[in-house]
DNA sequence: TTTAATTGATGTTAAATTAGTATCAGTTAG
DNA sequence: CTAACTGATACTAATTTAACATCAATTAAA
């Protein structure tokens, strides 16, 4: 059971690198080299971060990426959502016969509670925290 | 992001069905029909449950499966472990340069804490609890 | 004693997701 | 000009997840 995929992982790393040097543009090539991320893979990841307005970019020579959103406000949850969608355990554990009423299903409550708790943990972890802990 | 795979899901359902009727043998065909689980898929799932001593079986006509381990003691964690392995977030978020010391890495602690918390939640959820909540 | 329903064991295939590559057009600093 | 960049998009490869198939051995019951 793996909770984070490579793209989430790489995105987190890239964001920490950018947050560390937030005043200048860093090229994908530099970030890829520093973090040993496959270059083209990182490119597509960066484009998603652009679309989600976490970073901004400058084209052309000596262009690159710069962090846009405040690292204090970038939660790991945000990144997971971009690359892996929602945190869900499983659609529904039982069929009608066993679990007639989805709305009042107590099991569903348990499941939701676990999901919510996990999301909450990831919410507490921001890029800024990672940055401070690793620098 | 999906935390439970189909086999974990189906195994949980099958175990609840068996726990509900713990005195007789239920065939894979019956369970598959009742829970709308693909028959052959369920067969291989049942074999893993047998190997892990959660259920016992009887061969031949009117044979089938019966729950073996006390449903109070079957944690969702056990089932996840059988079908999905350990709960791990990601190998390691940063390379040497950023995160020199794995043993003392504070980020690693955070990650482990989240993993442990999730595992803890799944530990609290047993087949017996599901059974009581859905019957 | 035959038969139909069952599990045991094992191998194969199909579908979906994850990971990574390739290409080309447009931009810009030097 | 040109080399170093991003934007956009399409593609391929690898891995994991989901499901299917086959056949031997067992057993209750007709
Ligand atoms: S498990 Fe689906 S509604 Fe209860
Ligand atoms: S993130 Fe790997 S040891 Fe810190």
Image (cartoon, coloured by chain):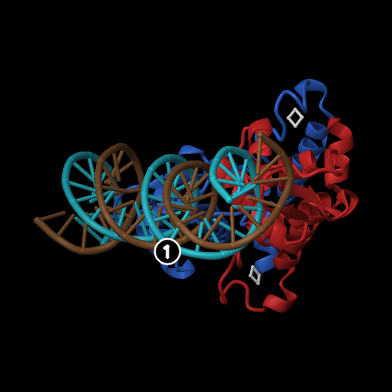
Chain colours: A blue, B red, C cyan, D brown
Q: Residue at x 29, y 51 (%)?
A: A60
Image position, residue C13 (x, y; %): 36, 49
Q: Is residue A104 left or right of residue A28?
A: right
Q: A77 or B7: which is nearer to us?
A: B7
Image position, residue A100 (x, y; %): 77, 21
Q: Which residue is mark 1?
A: A32
Q: B69 or A62: which is nearer to us?
A: B69
Image position, residue A26 (x, y; %): 43, 58
The local crowd at label 1, few if under 14, some if 14 to 19, many if 20 or more residues have their Cα within 10 Å, is: some
Name the quarter showing ligand 1.
Answer: top right
Q: A102 or A123: which is nearer to us?
A: A102
Residue B43 visible (yes or no): yes
Q: Residue at x 72, y 32 (%)?
A: A94
Q: Is residue A61 left or right of residue A84?
A: left
Residue A84 visible (yes or no): no
Q: Is residue A73 left or right of residue C30?
A: right
Q: Secondary structure at mark 1?
A: helix
Q: Residue at x 64, y 32 (%)?
A: B33
Q: Is residue A69 left or right of residue A29?
A: right
Q: Is residue B60 above or below residue D25?
A: above
Q: Is residue B24 above or below residue B68?
A: above
Question: Residue A119, located in which quarter of the rendered image?
Answer: top right
Image position, residue B60 (x, y; %): 66, 50
The chain containing the residue under callout 1 comes to A
């Amino acid at each position: 059971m793996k909770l984070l995929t490579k793209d989430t992982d790489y995105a987190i790393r890239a964001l920490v690198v950018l947050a560390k040097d937030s005043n200048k543009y860093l090229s994908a090539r530099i970030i890829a080299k520093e973090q040993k991320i496959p270059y083209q893979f990182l490119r597509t990841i960066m484009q998603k971060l652009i679309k989600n307005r976490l970073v901004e970019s400058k084209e052309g020579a000596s262009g690159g990426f710069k962090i846009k959103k405040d690292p204090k406000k970038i939660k790991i949850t945000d990144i997971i959502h971009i690359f892996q969608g929602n945190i869900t355990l499983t659609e529904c554990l039982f069929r009608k016969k066993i679990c007639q009423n989805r709305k009042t299903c107590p099991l569903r409550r348990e499941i939701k509670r676990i999901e919510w708790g996990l999301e909450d943990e990831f919410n507490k972890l921001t890029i800024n925290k990672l940055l401070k802990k690793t620098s």
